[in-house]
Amino acid sequence: VASGVGELHGLILEIVLTFGLVYVVYATAIDPKRGSLGIMAPLAIGLIVGANILVGGPFDGAAMNPARAFGPSLVGWRWKNHWIYWLGPFLGGGLAAIIYEYMVIPTEPPLHTHHQPLAPEDY
């Protein structure tokens, strides 16, 4: 965490950055209703990662991934405030998954419930 940035601010920033990343992954790569938007998934994910790095990089490094934060901490043997890079992404990613799964992709009843079964000679 950069000088002048508190632990709570760093945690909130990691939650927000990871929420944005996971939400974009859900919206472009996972959503079954996305149609042909799936071909844009790599570009959209790359753009949100780049934007997150530009926004959060100067303040807390914009890890957005515990594994990404663990390597530099291990090499530099700097563990102060390392818990932020584990708790923030877990909370942000979990929150994005819950919101997208239960609010954006709700379970829908089948549209055609009154259909005729196929005759045996048709299959």
Image (cartoon, rainbow, N blue to C red):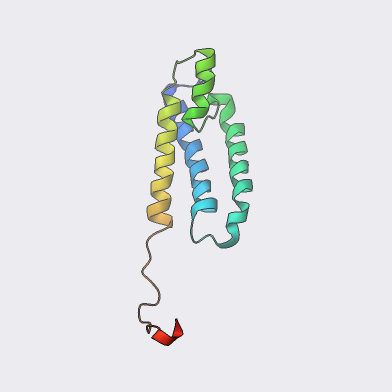
Q: Residue at x 49, y 43 (%)?
A: 22
Q: Nearer the viewer, residue 31 or 15?
A: 31
Residue at the top extreme of this rendering:
77
Left or right: where does residue 36 sit relative to residue 22? Answer: right
Q: Position of residue 23 (x, y in %)?
A: 49, 46
Q: Nearer the viewer, residue 45 or 121?
A: 121
Q: Residue at x 49, y 56 (%)?
A: 31
Which residue corresponds to the image point at 43% horizontal and 38% vertical from the top-left? 92
The C terminus lies in quadrant: bottom left
Residue 58's place in the image compared with 50, above or below, is above
Which residue occupies the foreground of this view, 115 or 55?
Answer: 115
Residue 120 in the image: x percent, y percent? Answer: 39, 85
- Give the vertical position of 84 relative to 114 (above or below): above
Please state the horizontal and vertical placement of residue 93, each as a whole percent of the image. 44, 40
- How many discs appear? 0
The image shows residue 65, relative to residue 79, as above or below, that is: below
Query: Looking at the picture, how far across and down is residue 6, in whole percent?
Result: 45, 21
Q: Is residue 6 above or below residue 31?
A: above
Q: Is residue 22 left or right of residue 112?
A: right
* 104 horizontally vs 39: left or right: left
